[in-house]
Image: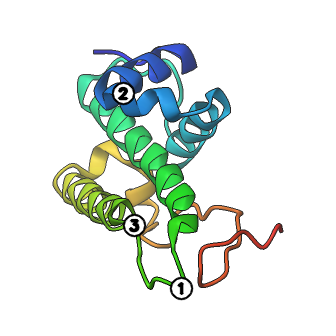
Amino acid sequence: MAVTDLTDFTDQISVEMGTLASKVADDAFDQASDKTLAELQWAYPITDSFKSYWTIERGKRHILQIFLIQSADKFKYKQINLNQRFDHYLALLKKMDEDFLHAVEENPESFPAAAGGISFPDYIANTFTYNILGRSLGT
């Protein structure tokens, strides 16, 4: 399974995410691809099966982060009710990050970022700013 370009990246993630993929805008796939490549310090085409696997896994993680951010506005103040999706996305992101860190520890030669001493949360931070309720501050 190779990831040759953005289209291939988008197609493979869409297949794995099923119906959720229809809720993702095209520019979100572009952003997830850019974040994934920057985080892993790899470039297309990716032909190694191990690297392809982690490219797709980290891409899905960045897409799920978009869903998490979108779900943040589902908080209902008057009813003190936080939509369960928010919690589910957080749990998924935590599990995906743990799996990735385990892979980095087991295969440090495959991840140039790990060799350079980059660790969570020092990797690539998003440029969005949100208040405690998850609302965008527009910066």
Q: Give amino acid for label 3.
A: Asn
Mark 3: give few (<14), some (14-19) or many (20+) Cα within 10 Å: some
Camera-side residue: 74 or 11? 74
Residue corresponding to mark 2: 19
Separation (CA) of disc 2 from disc 3? 19 Å
The residue under the point 33% across, 20% down is 15
Percent across and percent down for residue 32 are 55, 40
Q: Give amino acid for label 1.
A: Lys
Residue corresponding to mark 3: 83
Q: Quadrant of residue 2?
A: top left
Label 3 secondary element:
loop
Mark 2: give few (<14), some (14-19) or many (20+) Cα within 10 Å: few
Q: Give amino acid for label 2.
A: Thr
Q: Earlier in the sequence, mark 3 or mark 1?
A: 1
Label 1 secondary element:
loop
Separation (CA) of disc 3 from disc 1? 13 Å
Q: Is residue 29 above or below residue 118?
A: above
**In the figure, is residue 127 to the left or right of 133?**
right
Residue corresponding to mark 1: 78
The residue under the point 50% across, 60% down is 71
Q: Quadrant of the N terminus?
A: top left
Q: Nearer the viewer, mark 2 or mark 3?
A: 3
Mark 1: give few (<14), some (14-19) or many (20+) Cα within 10 Å: few
Q: Is residue 129 above or below residue 5?
A: below
